Amino acid sequence: MLNQQYKIGDKVFVMLRNPHVQGVVNIQEATVVERPDYPGEMAIFLNEEYFPLVDDLAIYTDYFEAKYDYQAAFDDGETEGYYG
C-alpha cells in the first residue's frame, strides 16, 4: 500500500487542484503526519487540513519530479517564452 513508502515527518510535494477554479493545479509542499482522528493512520497535512494518504493523490518526494509530471499533464506549450 502507498502508506508503506512514507514515514511521519517526511516532506512531500502534492499536486492539488484548486477547488474554486477547476482549471488550476498547484504543486505544494506538505508533511506526512499521523491522522489525529484515526491514530495509527497517516495523512498529508497541507493548507491547515489533513488529507488521508490514499493512492489517488499525486504525491512526490522530489519537487522536480512533481514539476515534470505537472508539465507533462497540464502544460499546453502556449506559455513558452511568456514572462509576465
Image (tube, rainbow, N blue to C red):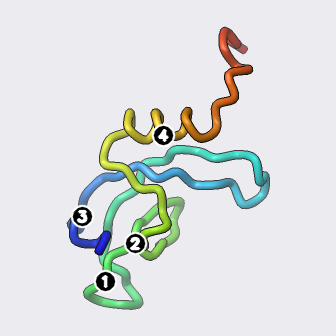
Foreground: disc 1 or disc 4: 4
| Quarter in which the N terminus is drawn | bottom left
Tag 1 residue: 41
Q: Residues within 10 Å of mark 2 (few under 14, many from 20)?
A: many
Q: Disc 2 marks which amino acid?
A: Leu
Q: Residue at x 51, y 65 (%)?
A: 48
Foreground: disc 2 or disc 4: 4
- Say whether marks 2 and 3 touch (CB < 8 Å): yes
**Comes first in the chain, label 2 or label 1:** 1
Tag 4 residue: 69
- Say whether marks 2 and 1 touch (CB < 8 Å): yes
Tag 3 residue: 6
Residue 46 position, x and y percent, is: 48, 61
Q: Residues within 10 Å of mark 3 (few under 14, many from 20)?
A: some
Q: Is residue 70 above or below residue 9?
A: above
Q: Disc 4 marks which amino acid?
A: Asp
- Say whether marks 3 and 4 touch (CB < 8 Å): no
Q: Nearer the viewer, residue 64 or 31?
A: 64
Q: Is residue 42 above or below residue 14?
A: below
**SS assignment at label 4:** helix
**SS assignment at label 1:** loop
**SS assignment at label 2:** loop
Q: Is residue 8 above or below residue 60?
A: below
Q: Residues within 10 Å of mark 4 (few under 14, many from 20)?
A: some
